[in-house]
Image (cartoon, grey):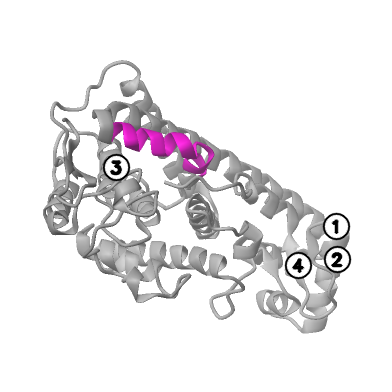
Amino acid sequence: MRSGQFKKMPSGYTTFFPANLPPVPPISMEGDLPLLLSDADRALGALNVVVTILPNPDLLVGIFIQKEALLSSQIEGTQSSLVDVLGANEDHVPTVDVGEVINYVKAMRHGLKRLREDDFPMSLRLIREIHGVLMQQVRGGGTHLTPGEFRRMQNWIGGTSPANARFVPPPAETMTDALGAFERYMHEDNAIPPLIRCALLHYQFETIHPFNDGNGRVGRLLITLYLVWKGILDEPMLYLSAYLKTHQQEYYDRLTQVRTNGNFEAWIRFFLEGIREVSRMVLQTTKRIQVLERTDSDRLVEHGEGSYGLTLLRGLMRQPVVTANDVARMIGASYTKANSLIAACENLGILRQIGTGKRNRKFIYNEYVAILSEGTELNPGIMA
């Protein structure tokens, strides 16, 4: 078959041996696929333009990385909200679920640093490094998770054993060859457009399933990192997991269709639709945030909080859940002044207290977080 072969193992279960990329026969560029590819390319190009005109692009990029981390983790069943994540810090992680999201952010930043500052290529070594960061001190904390190491045993998806699993990836002893071919394809210079290659690489990684745990999240991390590495995406502003979460069952079904009948084109079409839709979503979100920033800046100035207020607003764009101590640090003023400014922002409806406590109170930049939280609502997980 075009995508590989299902083989029955001596112990009785059936496992899948993926064919190397690119597919043979090659991807068919018939029907609406060329138009979708063009739309997705233009949508990503528009994101790159927006980055150049934002006064402080790092503020939004950091927040969007957190949103992608949360959404990708939610696909795997993590039960935490954006407010939980924004209100946490690395020194005090309130729940294991939030810790997993924070690890995802660390893994993304580690990958970006290696690609940009260290000029390190996309490679199996980098993938292992990313996995090592992602799986630090996660639930169970067990050594069976082997952070940063490819699996040495058979794994499976769904069911209680390979015998009743929905899908069984290639055995560990043959996986090394598949991973070697995967790495070579990442570096192959061919006529296949980068976005289509990215779709193929994500499918292949999820099919090889090289780790004991965390394969879905690493595979989605690789989408962003690959696009940045190839210069298709200037900044990691694309939270594609928003689309994959909304269409979660179709996401899994499209990957399964490639394995069962070699339908790469349907998967690529789904992937490009996601790129196009989320890119437009990011643009709309960015515009709404810019309007909110201008509106709230004007309100603070009119209220007589110009200097400190505008400094706080810039800080809230980076850290939208704060304490009075955080505000004092942001504006470089006393604790008393910070409390006074918080009260003014509460009166204006910019800040809202979370909870009802009187000590160690936390405040949220309410409308800003409401915009960012769209699509991150919790829903019952669908297992891959």
Please, what is the three-letter code of the amino acid marked with disc 2? Ala
- Image coordinates of residue 286 in percent, x first then y, are 58, 45
Element type at marker 2? helix
Residue that carries the numbered disc 4 in the rendered image: 363
Question: Marks 2 and 1: CB-CB under 8 Å?
Answer: yes
Residue 343 against residue 369 in the figure, above or below? below
Q: Nearer the viewer, residue 50 or 70?
A: 70
Q: Name the foreground residue: 274 vs 72.
A: 72
Q: Mark 3 or mark 2, which is nearer the start of the sequence?
A: 3
Q: Position of residue 113 (x, y in %)?
A: 34, 66
**Magenta span contains residue 28:** no
- Kindly identify the amino acid type of the residue bearing the numbered disc 4: Phe
- Look at the numbered disc 4 and give the secondary structure of its residue: strand
Which residue is located at x 30 percent, y 48 percent?
A: 163
Give the residues in magenta. 242-258
Please name the residue that numbered disc 2 is placed on.
Answer: 344
Nearest the eye: 139 or 136: 139
Residue at numbered disc 3? 203
Residues at circles 3 and 4 in contact by the CB criterion of under 8 Å: no
